[in-house]
Image (spheres, rainbow, N blue to C red):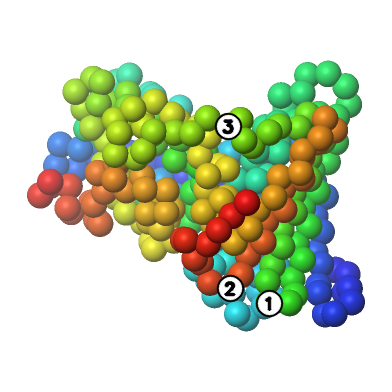
Amino acid sequence: MVVEADSVEVIELVFPPRPEVVSVARLVVGAAVAIDPAFDEERGADLRLAVSEACTNAIQAQLEQRRGGDADRPIVLRCSVGDGKITLTVKDHAGGFDPATLESHPLVTDPARLDYEGGLGIPLIQLLTDDVKFVSSPGGTTVIMTFEPRFRPDSADT
Amino acid sequence: MDLRLEVSEFGGWSVLHVGGEVDVATAPRLRERLIDMIGKDHLTIAVDLTSVDFIDSTGLGVLIGAVKRLRTRGGDLVLVRGDTRVSRVFEITGLDQVFTMVDTTDDLVDS
């Protein structure tokens, strides 16, 4: 643990891109959430869900890299707690992507919705976070997720 | 990472009791078991989520795939709702409108 200026506390986890480690990332986020009592259990569950989605995307993106050593490089999760909010950052070393090009799914009331088994992760992250930024480059993607203590379904996301 | 899977029969339903956490590491096992059950002609399947501590979109994707397979075969999949945290994922994503959900396995007999 590192204590930075203005009482922001940071927990960082560096882990191999293996599916089994996503559960560890959730535990680490659980520990980070416990630092700020303004985040209740339900909100803590939102953060654990969001980090699970982000880490899963990172791992799957790196597993898709067939070439080079980048597929084995560790994923970095950083939890920053302070100023009444929590910021979770997940960084991978897979090729980047453009979130604007993601296809959108049919509405849940459309039977065609059943044709889509995947791709729920990013919309879920957008729903759960108060703000999310995807910083993408050919070298990798960093997802920056900011959470306030209360879940707000109508909060504006980038 | 333990995912507990156990099948029982109840009122004409094949009930798959799931325990533990469903994520990218464990969802493939859930998927395999559901495919196996469907392959053995269990067409009315209830997935009991009451002992699930966590499920994310990889788990949701498996369930979507299963309900699709079953409905094209004239069957169906019903979810037995777990605790608030698990139910909430279905509400947040709107998937509680796609799936048929009941509160307890007893409700299967009335549905």
Residue A61 percent location from the top left of the image: 70, 31
- Chain for mark 2? A
Badge 2 local density, few (<14 within 10 Å), some, or many (20+)?
some
Tell how many labels.
Answer: 3
**Residue B91, picture quadrant:** bottom left
- Chain for mark 1? A
Instruction: Look at mark 3 in the image and give the residue it sits on.
Output: A102
Comes first in the chain, label 2 or label 1: 1
Which residue corresponds to the image point at 32% horizontal and 48% vertical from the top-left?
B96
Which residue corresponds to the image point at 71% horizontal and 45% vertical from the top-left?
A134
Q: Are marks 2 and 3 on the same chain?
A: yes
Q: What type is the residue that disc 2 sits on?
A: Pro
Marks 2 and 1: CB-CB under 8 Å? yes
> Mark 2 against mark 3, which lies toward the viewer?
3
Q: Are marks 2 and 1 on the same chain?
A: yes
- Chain for mark 3? A
The disc at residue A149 is: 2
Comes first in the chain, label 2 or label 3: 3
Which residue corresponds to the image point at 77% horizontal and 23% vertical from the top-left?
A65
Q: Are marks 3 and 1 on the same chain?
A: yes
Residue B37 visible (yes or no): no
Instruction: Look at mark 1 in the image and give the residue it sits on.
Output: A84
Mark 3 to mark 1 CA distance (whole Å): 32 Å
Q: What type is the residue that disc 1 sits on?
A: Gly
Q: Would residue A45 appear left or right of A73 to someone viewing this image?
A: left
Q: Would residue A147 appear left or right of A7 to someone viewing this image?
A: left
Mark 2 to mark 3 CA distance (whole Å): 29 Å
Q: Where is B11 relative to A81, above or below?
A: above
Residue B24 percent location from the top left of the image: 58, 38
**Could you tell me which secondary element the residue under label 3 belongs to?**
loop
Mark 2 to mark 1 CA distance (whole Å): 7 Å
